[in-house]
Amino acid sequence: MASASNNESVLEEIRAQVKSYHFPLDEVPRLNCHDPRAERLIQNEEPVILTDTNLVASALQWDANYLGEHIGNSNYTVYFSNTHKFLYYDDKKISKVPSFVPPTRHQDLTFQEFLRKMNKWKNGDPWMYLQQSLNNTVGPRIVQDFTAFNWTWVTEQQRKNKWGPLTSNLLLVGMEGVITPVHYDEQQNFFAQIHGYKRFLLFEPGMFPCLYPYPVYHPHDRQSQVDFDNPDFEKFPKLPELRGQQAILAPGDVLYLPVYWWHQVESVPERGMTISVNFWYKSAPTEKVVYPLKPQQKVAMMRNIEKMICDVLVNVEEVGPLMQSMVLGRYT
Ligand SMILES: CC1(C)c2ccccc2-c2ccc(C[C@@H](CC(=O)O)C(=O)C(=O)O)cc21
Ligand SMILES: [Zn+2]
């Protein structure tokens, strides 16, 4: 296990190597999980990098060969993209947008087939990202490592924060340099880094007006329309107000990624493939609505209003005009 100090020096190197954007980035706090400040940040639903959780200590030996040897020969979902960006889309919403062209495609491959493609990858080939729920079809050795995760710690966190059930653990194996563009999820997330380095850009839920998400009915629901590498300040005039935080994760680090927080995730270039496992939990049910509403609650409310208007109008072309006639000259 790398000592804390040379982990810190590698992190410093990476901070100097990574790309900067048009918006300012603070650093997400990096704290020992026993530090009371860490507990407070989690209770306040603010991101924090947790060290010494041992959450995935049993998996720190995972690398391409180990997984290739022990993960078994069941199929895994491998996404392919002509660029290094993997924009998520919801198949079920494509019917609502006939002109939609999926930016990625996926194929079921055994882990060994995925590794073979990785080893003979050359410039011009599509980029690849393996993403698969960890389930009981994996080989016995991986089951053993998975069983040895620090479930005591993470289950205690789930209880203390009154989260709902664990919904899934995604195994993520990415080529160096791949990017999951900025989006938000509707679940609490403990993101465990196992191999290689990942850089998160994080934006609080209140940054919603600066990130211009696609309509809820769109296949890219929950994703921002903004391309950070080519920001369109005319189309998105509130972009200059965007500011965020950065978290660079080393193997063994766990990022608490609060529900509704926007994030863009990059497998740090030239630092090899990345292996991660996330832990998605249903968020705690809102006990009593307290005013003023939290930004997360406003996002949830806006989603419900959009869904209702789309259901009633059926033709999504009518949604914009109706919402504009509601606010233009009346609330603006
Ligand atoms: C890009 C990809 C492979 C994908 C393709 C198609 C459908 C879904 C997804 C999906 C979902 C989650 C992640 C993990 C992570 C981002 C990261 O680590 O890259 C993240 O956002 C989170 O843990 O919340 C990655 C993906
Ligand atoms: Zn996500």
Image (cartoon, helix red, strand yellow):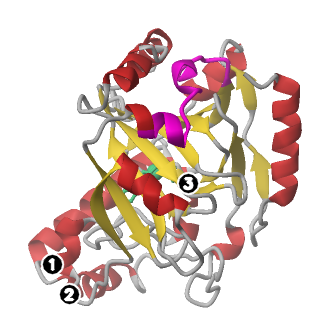
Query: Of the numbered discs in the image, which one, if any, rests on residue 95?
Result: 1
Above/below status of 88 relative to 225? above
Q: Is residue 218 left or right of residue 195?
A: left
Whether residue 252 is visible, yes or no, is yes
Query: Of the numbered discs in the image, which one, if any, rests on residue 218?
Result: none
Say what amino acid the circle numbered 2 marks. Pro
Query: Of the numbered discs in the image, which one, if any, rests on residue 98?
Result: 2
Above/below status of 20 relative to 315? above
Q: Earlier in the sequence, mark 1 or mark 3?
A: 1
**Which of the 4 image quarters holds residue 290?**
top left
Circle 3 sits on which residue? Answer: 263
Q: Are marks 2 and 1 in contact (CB under 8 Å)?
A: yes
Residue at 30% over, 79% down: 323
Instruction: Indicate yes or no whether the magenta region holds residue 60.
Output: yes
Viewer-nearest residue: 109 or 309: 109
Say if disc 3 is inside 8 Å of ligand 2: yes
Q: Residues within 10 Å of mark 2 (few under 14, many from 20)?
A: few
Q: Is residue 58 left or right of residue 176?
A: left
Q: Residues within 10 Å of mark 3 (few under 14, many from 20)?
A: many
* Magenta part of the chain: 51-68
Residue at 64% over, 81% down: 231
Viewer-nearest residue: 149 or 31: 149
- CA distance for labels 2 and 1: 6 Å
Q: Quadrant of the N terminus?
A: top right
Viewer-nearest residue: 20 or 267: 267
- In terms of secondary structure, where does tag 3 sit? strand
Above/below status of 273 relative to 57? below
Residue at 59% over, 27% down: 60
Residue 102, image x and y in percent? Answer: 32, 78
Residue 171, image x and y in percent? Answer: 41, 41
